[in-house]
Image: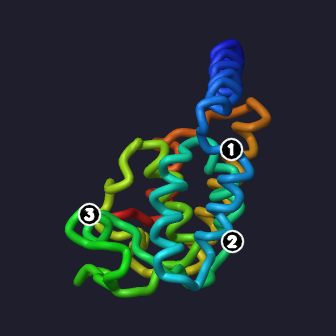
Amino acid sequence: MKLRKMIIFLLFAITIVLSRGNGATTMNDVQLLNKSLKSTNYADGTISVKNLFKAGDQAIPFLIENLDDTTPFTGLCGAKILDSQYTTGEKKYSAGQLKVPTIRDVSLYLIIAILKNDLYFASSCCPVSDDNSEERMCKACALIKERYYEFVKGSSSFSELDILNILAKEGIRFE
């Protein structure tokens, strides 16, 4: 198991080194995109969602740090409003979206989207739960952060399934 993780880490590191010469996204670029995600400019927020997704695994450490940020997100996120029929200049919200997403919501959505390799895996970037408990959401995000830090240390996995299981235990899901 440790050998597998070491091989994956080495392949990831080699990929980053090789991609830098091809104009790929650097960590500084990802950091700027993450900052732009928090912008109050509607277009900047929307474009950041798409570009952070494109940055893939490189964006995850920054998105993990956003899991405590409950500031409102200004932009579009989720399949119903990010599909090709809308432009970033239009404010279109899905009928089922009952709350304004936060930076935490969008970051969690993006982490799962990156791990699934599907930016449009749910119709809304707002997670839902039966009781809309902020306490349960905070607990789930803390567990996800803890799981990620354990993964970085090499003592656990960090996959889409790991995150979805944590959310399910807290009664949270994306629809």
Question: How many residues crowd around disc 1 within 10 Å: few (fewer than 14), some, or many (20 or more)?
Answer: some
Give the amino acid at mark 1.
Answer: Thr
Q: Quick one: SS at disc 1?
A: loop
Q: Is residue 164 visible?
A: no
Q: Residues within 10 Å of mark 3 (few under 14, many from 20)?
A: few
Q: How crowded is the residue under tag 2: few (<14 C-alpha within 10 Å), some, or many (20+)?
A: some
Which label number is shown at residue 56? none
Residue, x 66% and y 15% (percent of image)? 7
Residue 83: which numbered mark, if any?
A: 3
Q: Residue at x 46, y 70 (%)?
A: 46
Identify which amino acid the numbered label 2 is placed on: Asp
Left or right for 103, reference 90:
right
- Residue 137 image offset from top left, x and y in percent: 56, 71
Task: Tell me the SS state at disc 2.
Answer: helix
Give the Cα distance between marks 2 and 3.
28 Å
Q: Nearer the viewer, mark 1 or mark 3?
A: 1
In the rendered image, the residue lying farthest to the top is 3
Viewer-proximal residue among 19 and 71: 19
Circles 1 and 3: CB atoms closer than 8 Å: no
Choose the circle earlier in sequence order: 1 or 2.
1
Q: State the residue at coordinates (70%, 37%).
A: 151
Mark 2 lies on residue: 68
Locate the C terminus and report the quarter of the image it occupies: bottom left
Residue on which the image places disc 1: 26
- Asked if residue 172 can be seen in this view, the reply is yes
**Label 1, label 2: how far apart the Cα atoms are:** 24 Å
